Amino acid sequence: MSDSDSIVRLPRKCPICGKPTVEATKPFCSKRCADIDLSRWLKGVYAIPVEESNAAADSEDSEDDPYRRER
């Protein structure tokens, strides 16, 4: 018996409503919850916070940037 055989996996819960997941719509419990999640992504509800560094701002002003837009 290997270590991977002894791992007990707990049933996962739907991240939207908390009900047990269904294989067909994993990781959600239903198409409805999957659609709610998609809607949140499309509306921008989920966002990863980003802090711009000075290096990124300096590179935007660079004359060597071939994608630089004229202002």
Image (spheres, rainbow, N blue to C red):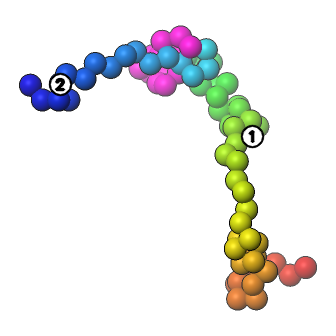
Height in image: 43 above or below 21? below
Mark 1: amino acid: Gly
Q: Check disc 2 and report the residue beneath it.
A: 5
Q: Residues within 10 Å of mark 2 (few under 14, many from 20)?
A: few
The kind of secondary structure element at disc 2 is helix
| Residue 25 visible in the snapshot | yes
The circle on residue 44 is 1
The spot of residue 39 in percent (x, y) is 70, 31
The kind of secondary structure element at disc 1 is loop
Viewer-closest of 52 and 67: 52
Residue found at the far top of this picture:
19
Task: Identify the image quadrant of the C terminus.
Answer: bottom right
Residue 67 picture quarter:
bottom right
| Residue at x-position 20% and y-position 29% | 4
Q: Which residues are magenta?
A: 18-29
- Tell me, yes or no, whether the highlighted magenta stretch contains residue 21: yes
The spot of residue 1 in percent (x, y) is 9, 25
Q: Is residue 27 left or right of residue 16?
A: left
Residue found at the far left of this picture:
1
| Residue depth check, mark 2 versus mark 1: number of the one nearer the observer | 2
Q: Residues within 10 Å of mark 1 (few under 14, many from 20)?
A: few
